[in-house]
Amino acid sequence: MSAYTSSAQLFGHATAQAPGKVNLSLAVGEPREDGYHPLATLFLAVSMVEEVTATHRADGLITVSISDASSAFADPDTIPLDETNLAVRASRLLRDHLGLDAETHGVHLEITKQVPVAGGMGGGSADAAAALAACAGLWEAGLSRDELARIGAPLGADVPFAVTGGAAVGRGVGDELTPLLSRDPLHLVLVPASQGLSTPQVYTTLDTLRADGVLDTPETAPDVSPELIQALVAGHAESVALLMSNDLQVPATTMVPELSEMIEIGMEEGALAGQVSGSGPTIMFVARSAEDSMQLAGRIQDRTGIAAVPVHGPYPGARLL
Ligand SMILES: C[C@](O)(CO)[C@H](O)COP(=O)(O)OP(=O)(O)OC[C@H]1O[C@@H](n2ccc(N)nc2=O)[C@H](O)[C@@H]1O
Ligand SMILES: Nc1ncnc2c1ncn2[C@@H]1O[C@H](COP(=O)(O)OP(=O)(O)OP(=O)(O)O)[C@@H](O)[C@H]1O
């Protein structure tokens, strides 16, 4: 063993964490030829995280398991445990990028999920981001956060933000990020649903509602309100609540009408605002403070029997523990 053998090599494992996200605003344009929609969004990473432990495998295989899945809402059994798993794909991409020998540089990935599956919070993207960080640690890649975000981008539009975390404006398909500083945390309550929603189907429903004239087709390119950015940066929850928006809200509530009822309930219980996160069905409510978020979560839970979770953001992006 050389004097320079690192702890990751010595112990053969590394653990990393990456956050789920909400979209405080999400403006969606007309679909491009590849089916993706141009968008402008205000991302906020929140204190609901995915953890991935990468353990060296000398046989070159990349395998995955999910532990403690009971804490993940929606059905964790729907997550593939084969080579299509986003964490597995992320590790393979990184191994190829580093030019490591695929015969000897295998890894087992153990995912501990908190973020709801197919919940509109980028849970799979966070798994990919945490896997990238854990494997970068295990293989001592010496890559910057920006490089990891670039390597992960082909895996999904939300992956770069799960790597960088914090708060950011996302453009392009959500992968062109402008990070923001913010003063005080925003406190939210998340209400996951028992069934996930398919992101492509929610985007397709938006297209249909626009084609049918139920929703207006935007005449200008999608953008993020500068006032909303200012409100977030200043930590002004009341103004964030007033200015929030999501073009996928109507499609998501058209597909699952109970979501509108849940938003009503949260508002009756004192939330400043409520809307679906990303493509839904997770609903986020804005609270006035940390204490208010805990009380609001308790009231929603008492009234509906559904576990409501107080969280805060911005939260750091993918990092080794
Ligand atoms: C809804 C959001 O979470 C908002 O941040 C994202 O736009 C979705 O990001 P994601 O789940 O990482 O998306 P991907 O896995 O890249 O794409 C899944 C599918 O969603 C649709 N999709 C996604 C992103 C985008 N800007 N336009 C789209 O139309 C496409 O049909 C795509 O095939
Ligand atoms: N490690 C993974 N964790 C979760 N889903 C995965 C994973 N690997 C592949 N998937 C697939 O990705 C799909 C989307 O899951 P995910 O939890 O990321 O949805 P989401 O949070 O709605 O995504 P987004 O908010 O980015 O649209 C799942 O239905 C699942 O089949």
Image (spheres, rainbow, N blue to C red):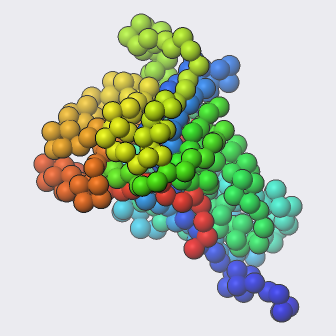
Query: Left or right of 138: which side holds 23?
Result: left
- Judged from this view, the residue extending furthest toward the left is 303
Asked if residue 63 shows in the view, the reply is: no
Query: Left or right of 288: which side holds 92?
Result: right
Q: Please give the name of the residue rendered at 49% of the width and 51% of the height, measured from the top-left corner.
A: 182
Query: Left or right of 31: which side holds 240?
Result: left
Q: Quadrant of the N terminus?
A: bottom right
Residue 269 image point, x, y percent: 16, 44
**Which of the 4 image quarters holds residue 236?**
top left
**Which of the 4 image quarters holds residue 69?**
bottom left
Residue 316 image point, x, y percent: 54, 60
Is residue 217 placed above or below 255 in the rendered structure? above
Q: Please give the name of the residue rendered at 42% of the width and 40% of the height, measured from the top-left corner.
A: 231
Residue 292 image point, x, y percent: 23, 55
The front one of 101 and 136 is 136
Q: Please give the name of the residue rendered at 38% of the width and 32% of the height, measured from the top-left corner.
A: 243
Q: Please give the name of the residue rendered at 44% of the width and 21% of the height, measured from the top-left corner.
A: 205
The front one of 81 and 26 is 26
Q: Quadrant of ligand 1?
A: top right
Total numbered circles:
0
- Judged from this view, the residue extending furthest toward the top is 213
Asked if residue 247 shows in the view, the reply is: yes
Is residue 29 placed above or below 92 in the rendered structure? above
Is residue 26 placed above or below 153 in the rendered structure? above
Is residue 90 placed above or below 230 in the rendered structure? below
Q: Quadrant of the C terminus?
A: bottom right
